[in-house]
Amino acid sequence: MEAKTAAKEKFFVVLRGKSRKGFCRGCVGRVEAETQRGELMGLLYCGGSGAGGPKSGGVVRREDTYPLTRHQAQLLLFVPSASRRLELLCNPQLFSAVCALTQDDLVVVRHKKGHLPGMVRNLMQIGRKENKDDLHMLGFEVEFVDNDNNLSSKKPAPLPLFSAADIVQVVPSYSVPLGLHWRDSQCGGPNIKTVTRINSMPNIGSRARQEREKHAEQNAAPSQSPSTSRVPLEVGSMVEVVSNSGITVYGVVRWLGVLAGKSDEWAGIELDYEVNGCSDGKYGSQRYFTCKGSRALFVPVTKCSPDSRFVYSSTGRETPRPTETPPVPPFEDLEEDASPIPESDALSLLVGRMKGIQGHINSCYLDATLFSLFSTSVTLDHICQKPADTEQPITCTLRKIVNRLRRQGFVPAESVMNFRKQLGCDTFQTEEKDPEEFITVLFQKVLCMEPLLKLRSRRETSQGAYTFQIFLEKEQMGQMPTVQQLLDTSCLSGDLKFEEMPSCLIVQMPRFGNKYKMFSHIIPSTELDITDLLYNSPRECFVCGHLAEYECLQCLPDRKLQPGRSKQYCTTCNTQVHSHHKRQGHSPIALQVPANVASDTPVPRHMMQLFAVLCIQTSHYVSFVKYGPDPHSWLFFDSMADRCGDDQSGFNIPEIRACPELGDFLSQSEEELTWANPSQTPELVRRLLCDSYMFLYQNPARPLSKPNHQEP
């Protein structure tokens, strides 16, 4: 009778919704009844270190909850804080593995000494059940593994208790090398809590033994040749490596190649958690990739095996087991608008998997653009002010996306899909668009902004634009031009000038479609000097620095005069430069010199700073974003870096990686950059040089003005 009653029990965890009397986010509850409006009435538990008795009753909307089994509810109850429960739920693979743990399974736990490997000894019930509504909490007794490949041989002592959120990795038992023996523990339980060992864990220990026996049988069979048994690896492959201490570690291949001083192929792996002795992507004094400290492991490729936690198809590619979409962390749109993420908080808030904006159905063009524009840029901060009562709903939706990104570091695909629907065109929901098309709709229709750029031609006609498309002939440039050279040449060739200093300048590279690009590599200019591209603005002589009075387009490609840069001269220098026999046929154009400006007056420079780059490769957009003034403060964002499950039931995993090596590369002089060999640069730097699509520049001294309807 009791078992039948328990089978009808339904539990849940509150994911979102405004906190009010009776419940709060992260609380675990048991359904008592359901209202006609679809709301759940239930008993709510606080959990943590106290007993598992209900603290109150409450009413929760069904859509604000996530269903749990009794076992899952008991495990979450022992997690001390609501935020850590919700964080665990956002990693469905880990949570499922923790819920399935049995005796003798190997785990890695979060400890005050760092991440330590150990073995699950017992599943513990915590707390007394004094009435029928009480719910036992569940925790794990874990015995640590020492450096000698055995469990700690110190005097038996009470084993520490760990909650489900303390477990950062579950190591399959069959991953333990054969011949590694574990000492049986006879330790008693801790006396600091009321605990009860559960000796009736289903099939306790059987999975470990069965997998070890199966593994031994496979090893006893004739081995296949390496050419037929080894699965080919590539950057992005999920692998496992048996460490020197006998514990299997897991990670993602970030680099493949031959290390300095080595002759065979090695792999650079970013591990799932920190390990003593590992680096942040350096081997010796050379950097091969970048990740968090103590997570980079370099090993010969022959020591890498495909991640056994996943199912493999006949093609050898990883196919993660289908899983439900992970629960989304709760978010409340507070009264205050979030500021751009500061440099000091960017790495801790943003770097990692399930970070940034989650991609869904060809949304990468939109994800990369929104992340570039709104995550850390101060220039665009003023357009995300608190909405007026008359503001259109789509602007409010965008504001929620921006606030969520800045506060939590993660925006679920559901939020972005809602935004795409509100854009008003079916193709925005399902098809891949060009970023420039989305940017125009974003600023013009959603934010009601005037064009970011005001361009004037020699014919005195003025036109507005939101992006600047580079148009030029390939013969006008070298093999690997800078953005500065491309902009200067394009403006002068098209006889265009900026009427005023823009707040935001988005420069689109000379490439068309997914395949054609005019230049195989383009060097980013961290600063754009647009002084010589401003209409009716003082300019200095290219030779002597005095006030310029003439401009010569034909001098632009002259390799003796720094090709690719604007050429303007004072009267004296104009005469001298064009006295050369190769320049006597040039036709300099007189400039409109501002009145009341002395010829020897210093001309102020007007500079714009690079804050983001959109890249495209095989129809997929990613972005690089600068999150602070430090030259090394760069992030790499991919809204679809990985996928869990198949096309029907799976979901994309967005990822953000720190990219300080980009700062190392861009800190070189322009001459060094021009002579750089892209094939010898780190992976992400090479990707930026080869795949750049748009460069985004800002003028921090002049933020964008508010939308038209907010102006007084």
Image: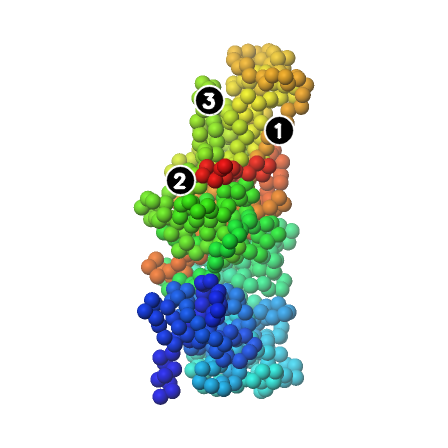
Mark pair 3, 2: CA separation? 26 Å
Position of 378 relative to 597 (above/below): below
Residue drawn at point x = 34 percent, y = 67 percent: 38
Q: Which residue is mark 2?
A: 445
Comparing 527 with 664, the one in front is: 527
Counting residues from the start of the chain, the first of labels 3 and 2 encountered is 2
Where residue 487 appears, x then y in whole percent?
A: 51, 30
User: In the drawing, does residue 542 fall left or right of residue 196?
Assistant: right
Q: Which residue is mark 1?
A: 605
**Dot 2: element:** helix
Give amino acid for label 2: Lys
Above or below 163: residue 641: above
The picture places residue 538, in percent across and down from the top left corner, at 60, 22
- Badge 2: residue crowd in 10 Å (few <14, some 14–19, many ≥20): few
The residue carrying mark 3 is 457
Residue 477: where, in percent of width, then height?
Answer: 50, 28
| Alpha carbons under labels 2 and 1: distance apart | 34 Å
**Who comes first in sequence, dot 2 or dot 1?**
2
How crowded is the residue under tag 1: few (<14 C-alpha within 10 Å), some, or many (20+)?
Answer: few
| Image disc number at residue 567 | none
